[in-house]
Image (cartoon, rainbow, N blue to C red):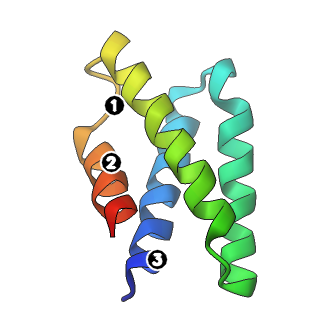
Amino acid sequence: MSNTENFRNACEEAVQLFDKLKTEEHTEIKSKLKYCIGSFDYDKNPDGLYEFGEIALKELKSFKDKNPRKVNKKIIENLEKNLKN
């Protein structure tokens, strides 16, 4: 599996987490990330995926700072690891 595929899967985990959190503030990033995942699945162009994956990572880190028990650090670590590659 390529690094981009791994990052796509990490973004999918982030979307699932945003769904669980049910926060109004994350609705926009969640929908944009879902769109980028679908777009990547269709055309394999990862530009949007990386752009919004990075934004999602920042949002999750910020949310985790305020609510440490609601965000699994493994999701953040997966995004970080695959973003670097």
Amino acid, disc 2: Ile
Q: Tell me if label 1 and label 2 are in contact, CB under 8 Å.
A: yes
Q: Return the residue nearer the eye: 16 or 83.
A: 83
Q: Is residue 67 visible?
A: no
Q: Tell me if label 3 and label 2 are in contact, CB under 8 Å.
A: no
Task: State the image coordinates of residue 59 (x, y, percent, origin top left).
Answer: 50, 30
Dot 1, how many residues are within 10 Å of its Cα: few (below 14), some (14-19), or many (20+)?
some
Report the mark closest to the observer, 3 or 2. 3
Residue 4's disc number: 3
What is the C-alpha distance between the residues marked 3 and 2? 16 Å
Q: Quadrant of the N terminus?
A: bottom left
Image quarter for residue 43?
bottom right
Amino acid, disc 3: Thr
Image quarter for residue 42?
bottom right
What is the C-alpha distance between the residues marked 3 and 1? 23 Å
Q: Which residue is mark 2?
A: 75
Residue 84's disc number: none
Q: Is residue 79 left or right of residue 16?
A: left
The image shows residue 36, relative to residue 79, as above or below, that is below
Dot 3, how many residues are within 10 Å of its Cα: few (below 14), some (14-19), or many (20+)?
some
Amino acid, disc 1: Val
Sequence-first disc among 3 and 1: 3
Residue sitting at 68 percent across and 56 percent down?
Answer: 34
Q: Which residue is mark 1?
A: 71
The image shows residue 71, relative to residue 39, as above or below, that is above
Q: Is residue 39 left or right of residue 33?
A: right
Residue sitting at 65 percent across and 42 percent down?
Answer: 30
Q: Quadrant of the C terminus?
A: bottom left
The image shows residue 21, relative to residue 36, as above or below, that is above
Q: Return the residue nearer the eye: 19 or 74.
A: 74
Residue sitting at 24 percent across and 47 percent down?
Answer: 74
Q: Is residue 20 left or right of residue 62?
A: right
